[in-house]
Amino acid sequence: MYLGISLGHGTDREAEHWLRENVRPLGLPGLVACTHLVRTPRPHVAISLSVSSPVPLPPGLPELREGTALAVHEHRARRSGRAVLYPGIEHLVGTVRVDELLERTAIDQVVLLGGARAAPETAIETGDFVRPQWRNGELTLIATPLRPGRIAPFEMPNPTPCCAGH
């Protein structure tokens, strides 16, 4: 079952906070919760959920229903969505190997910038922040090389804004 909600969050961080406070405590088995940057009818972050049973969600903002529907459609099709909550996320603390990550979580593949798949024995320094994305039907973690034998998720929890300090 796929559900969605748009509450007008302006950033992924705001939407993640809402998910941590309102959805994670429900302890839903098999939950995959994603954020989606949508522009309909105005730019905002919509949330989609894949759940095994109905979840009581507050009503979203009526004017954002179209963006919510788009987010749910993309999640269902496994074309887009940035996974914030998903099975096995609790195992992604510190450094883990790619093969362990694939075995213990809902993530289907780890791809390096440029498109090559990460080798199973490669260590991932998670920074305790792992946000895979739906791509071509697979939950995909995009990673960047750090040094030989080590990679990190491409998305960082607190990136430096573009042109910071100007």
Image: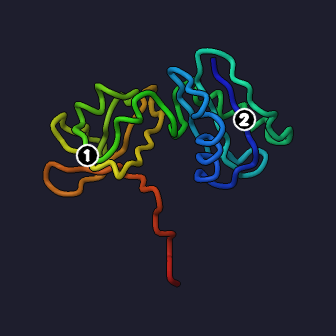
Q: Amino acid at mark 2?
A: Ile
Element assignment for label 1: strand
Looking at the image, residue 91 sits to the left or right of residue 17; the answer is left
Tally the numbered discs: 2
User: Callout 1, which amino acid?
Assistant: Thr
Tell me the residue that label 1 is attached to: 95
Q: Nearer the viewer, mark 2 or mark 1?
A: 1
The image quadrant of residue 124 is top left
> Which disc number belongs to residue 56?
none
Q: In the displayed structure, would residue 152 be above or below residue 4?
A: below
Task: Where is residue 79? Give x, y as percent.
Answer: 52, 31
> What residue is drawn where x is 61% and y is 48%?
17
Q: Nearer the viewer, residue 62 or 89?
A: 89
Q: Position of residue 90 (x, y in %)?
A: 40, 36
| Left or right for 150, reference 88 | left
- Residue that appears at 29% across and 47% down: 94
Residue 122, how many percent across, how many down? 18, 42
Q: Which residue is the site of mark 2?
A: 5
Asked if residue 119 is positioned above or below residue 129 in the image, the reply reads above
Distance of label 2 from label 1 (alpha carbons) = 33 Å
Residue located at (45% from left, 34% from top): 135
Circle 2 — which element? strand
Q: Say if mark 2 contacts mark 1, CB within 8 Å.
A: no
Query: Does residue 113 appear in the picture of this structure?
Result: no
